Image (spheres, rainbow, N blue to C red):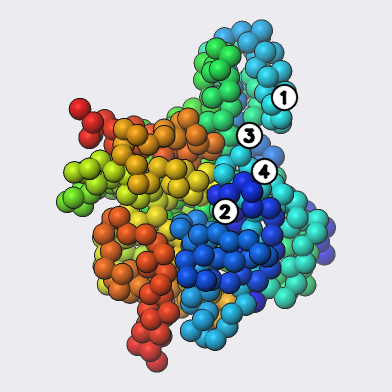
Amino acid sequence: MLAIVGTVPDIEFDLSVGLVELVKDQLCLDGKTVSVNRGTPALLGAAIQTLAVFDKKEVTGFLAGDIGLGDGSRKMYEYLVNTASLSGIHTLVFHYLQPDADWQNKIMFTLQEMQDKPVLIADAGFMYAAKMSGAATGYDLFTPDAGELAFLADEHAPHPFYTRGFILHTDNSVADLVQRAYAHDNAARFLLVKGATDYIMNKDGELFRVDSPSQEVMEAIGGTGDTLTGIAAALISTGMDIPMAAVAAAKINRVAGQLADPTPATRISDIIDHIPTAVACVLKERT
Amino acid sequence: MFNFVKKKWLEKSAGSKKDPALADHGFLVFENTSEVIQAEKLLKLNGWDVRVMGPPPEIQTGCDLVIFFPLIEQLNIIRLLETTSNPPLQVVPVTDPLLTPVSLFQVKDFGDFLMVRAANMKITIEKKTRIIVNISGGGCPDVPYLANEMVGKTVSSAPDPLDIGHTLCGYALALAFTEVKNRCLP
């Protein structure tokens, strides 16, 4: 089973856990609804659309309302450590959460205690917390974009906001930044680096790259990184190995984007609508 | 088994010189002790988990006390201190007090649209109307909230993330937003 932990930008949305449904461009969980417009809801929407092709509908959401004050995130951290049952989860994704190194550590200790530890994926705020607390190597997959890769590569930066200019500079190659991130133990077992070209890397270097179909404007559209992580997580939860899932996800995200005929003003929900077609198309090509 | 794993991991953390309890914190540096005490009182009254301690050697300015605070909430904390005319002289990360906020912007021209990136945050406007059409990147929970509040509004009518944001991602978006304004407003 795939489980996704994150927040939604609604302070009225109390902590909720359960199976998530996608109805048009709304996610439904425990009687509450939230738009798939970027962030964790976009990741969930993409994962649900991907699994629909496999006739699998079970995606568990761990969601709490948080607009940046950290209250919803802290409730979620406490719930995960003290109350939640995480058994039976094959793939566990941590996403938009207020970065907090101390809580990240407590969650990692909880996960280390499990008999069958899930495949662990971190993106967004929780990836920042994992790096800050020196726990990055405990994760299976990080999915940074260019700015976040520079942050992982900067062993001193506690947040992307403080990444040093000489590392953030665009002249640095992805390979150099990845090597630097691994040299300081600031990367997961695999990295899916999102960008004009998507790179699948590990400590030994580049495994694969995906650069077509190319839609340059995708970079401007809020949520395209979230959908890529959601598709990859969904594929991994079906048993696909991580590098293969990352390659397929990168391709699927691009094809879905192309089908939406995007401009920089496109909404992510328009791309999510095309994911099932893109999944079918890419997986057919691979067989 | 668990204790063994935990011990090994803590050893590794120590070996890498990262103290997990400190890595996501910062120091607020003030002019004098009186300002430190006032700020500490205000922040504690407002529910923040802060404490007063001696500064690291890298900090050359200010008094001999600093406030230790959760760095991710820098934007929120500074905003509160500014309401009482007691802003800090400096805000620095514990991991390296010499680090400064990003000052490098990446600009991409999509023809009718312009995108500006600061650190991990990107903002895109339509040039003709100056309407914010998208906000992307970031990982803190105020990013989707800020996008909801800003997208669809013009650059001059949209709220500033410095006023309504809460985290360092919000702060990075504010830098990108200012850069957009510098480039497209007369």
Q: Earlier in the sequence, mark 3 or mark 1?
A: 1
Q: Amino acid at mark 3?
A: Pro
In what quadrant of the picture does the N terminus of chain B appear? bottom right
Asked if disc 1 and disc 4 are in contact, CB closer than 8 Å, the reply is no
The chain letter for the residue carrying disc 1 is: B
The chain letter for the residue carrying disc 4 is: A
Asked if disc 3 and disc 1 are in contact, CB closer than 8 Å, the reply is no
Q: Residue furthest bottom?
A: A287
Q: Are marks 1 and 4 on the same chain?
A: no
Q: Residue at x 37, y 59 (%)?
A: A267
From the image, state whether disc 4 or disc 3 is nearer to you.
4
Cα separation, mark 3 vs mark 2, equals 22 Å
Cα separation, mark 3 vs mark 1, equals 12 Å
Q: Are marks 3 and 1 on the same chain?
A: yes
Q: Disc 3 marks which residue?
A: B70
Q: Which mark is residue A71?
A: 4
From the image, state whether disc 1 or disc 4 is nearer to you.
4
Q: Amino acid at mark 2?
A: Val
The chain letter for the residue carrying disc 3 is: B
Residue at disc 1, secondary structure: helix
Task: Tell which of A234 and B132 is nearer to you.
Answer: B132
Task: Tell which of A105 and B97 is nearer to you.
Answer: A105
From the image, state whether disc 3 or disc 2 is nearer to you.
2
Q: Residue at x 68, y 68 (%)?
A: A18
From the image, state whether disc 3 or disc 1 is nearer to you.
1
Q: Disc 1 marks which residue?
A: B44
Q: Which mark is residue A8?
A: 2
Asked if disc 1 and disc 2 are in contact, CB closer than 8 Å, the reply is no
Q: Amino acid at mark 4?
A: Asp
In this rendering, the answer to whether A160 lies above or below A265 is: above
In this rendering, the answer to whether B168 lies above or below A17 is: above
Residue at disc 2, secondary structure: strand
